[in-house]
Image (spheres, grey):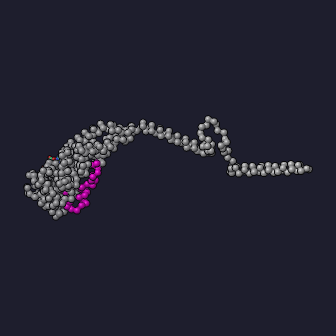
Amino acid sequence: MNCFDRLKKAFSSFTEKISNKLEEKKEEIKETERPSGPPQEPVVTSDTQVPEQDQTPKRETTELKPEQRIADQAVQNSENVQRREDRKFDLFGFIRYKEIKEEDVSDLIDELRFELLEDDVSLEVTEKILEDLKRNLVGKKVSRKENLEQLIHESLKKSLKDILKKNYIEKDVVETIKTSKKPFVVMFFGVNGVGKTTTIAKFAMLLKKSGLSVIIAASDTFRAAAQEQLAVHASKLEVPLVKGKYGGDPASVAFDAIQSAKSRGIDAVLIDTAGRMHTDKDLVEELRRLVRIAKPNLKVLVLDSLAGNDALKQAEYFEKAVGYDFVILTKVDADAKGGIALSLAYELGKPVMYLGMGQDYDSLVKFNPDWFTERLLS
Ligand SMILES: Nc1nc2c(ncn2[C@@H]2O[C@H](COP(=O)(O)OP(=O)(O)OP(=O)(O)O)[C@@H](O)[C@H]2O)c(=O)[nH]1
């Protein structure tokens, strides 16, 4: 073998070694690229053929694994379903519900204004109540099936009840007297002819029926026949009465009655007073003095429901003059709706405790806001 043949043989063995090494390396690379675990779907690589018309960016679609694409598709589908549902809901909502507009309620509100004014609710209070009502209704979504007129009536009824219940005294005075120290003193006042004397007689009857003993102080020494009128009631009811001299001091009559109640262990003293208005300056001063001396546990303003808006003026006046705990509204049986109760509660925050419903002794009934509201809107 010449040197040329030896050189050729060495070169061939060298190339064979190189080729073997290359084969080994290839195998190694394949081994490292193969994913571990169970066999999976082939990975889509950038070498995968993409149809020409597919305009979606290659990187995004091609680099996603199938399970991720399935999950994305599911999310997409559910979003589409939700959007369709929303559109359906909007459509059904529009069919089933409507928003109350101002023009829908204005005619009915005008009717209610008329109704409330006829019931003797003051103009100011009527306007305020209807303004509140409008504010609550306009813009509200209601079922198209709903009767708007009925809805407005129900809303008004609710707001009237709320007003009347705001300062409403649930506990009956009779119960308060039963559980209080003897004698319990109640003073009645109001303008002439509202029904004070009759109301005192009715109240005495109420207490007697509840097993309480009563004495009446005829402190109206101003009007000529007032004491005689009260004496007639007292005798019919078999209740003791303390009288004074005509033109005498009303405070001393009240004082005598309280002393008598103390010594005889009587439960309640009811004090009648002369009717007066703000023009009777002396009588107002006298009433203040009477309050100072008798120190009544309760001061009661008697108002005539037939007096309409005048009754509200009286209520304001007596509140300033001496103040009072509650109102008894008389003559409610005489075709008066008694809207004054609403004005009283709204304007002055004063509750009505009893209603005079006739001339009989047992016609004094406890005020009930629910019943009264029904009556107002009947
Ligand atoms: N229908 C009806 N009449 C009543 C009621 N309460 C009082 N009256 C009548 O109203 C009139 C006046 O009642 P009085 O009790 O005398 O009134 P007053 O407030 O004491 O009057 P003065 O003593 O003048 O201040 C009488 O005819 C009573 O019978 C009532 O609830 N219903």
Q: Give how far across and how far down residue 350 sits, in percent.
A: 24, 51
Quarter assignment of residue 173: bottom left
Res. 331 in view: no
Residue drawn at (39%, 38%), measured in percent from left and top? 98
Q: Is residue 2 above or below residue 249?
A: above
What count of labels does the image hold? 0
Quarter assignment of residue 52: top right
Residue drawn at (14%, 50%), measured in percent from left and top? 277
* Most foreground residue, 58 or 36: 58
Question: Residue 180 magenta-drawn?
Answer: yes
Question: Residue 215 magenta-drawn?
Answer: no
**What are the residue bounds of the magenta stretch?**
163-186
Residue drawn at (24%, 44%), measured in percent from left and top? 124
Q: Give how far across and how far down residue 9 sits, in percent.
A: 86, 49
* Most foreground residue, 251 or 171: 251
Where does the C terminus fall, quadrant-wise? top left
Q: Is residue 328 above or below residue 119?
A: below
Q: Give how far across and how far down residue 141 sits, in percent.
A: 38, 41
* Most foreground residue, 191 or 176: 191
Q: Give how far across and how far down residue 360 sits, in percent.
A: 18, 48
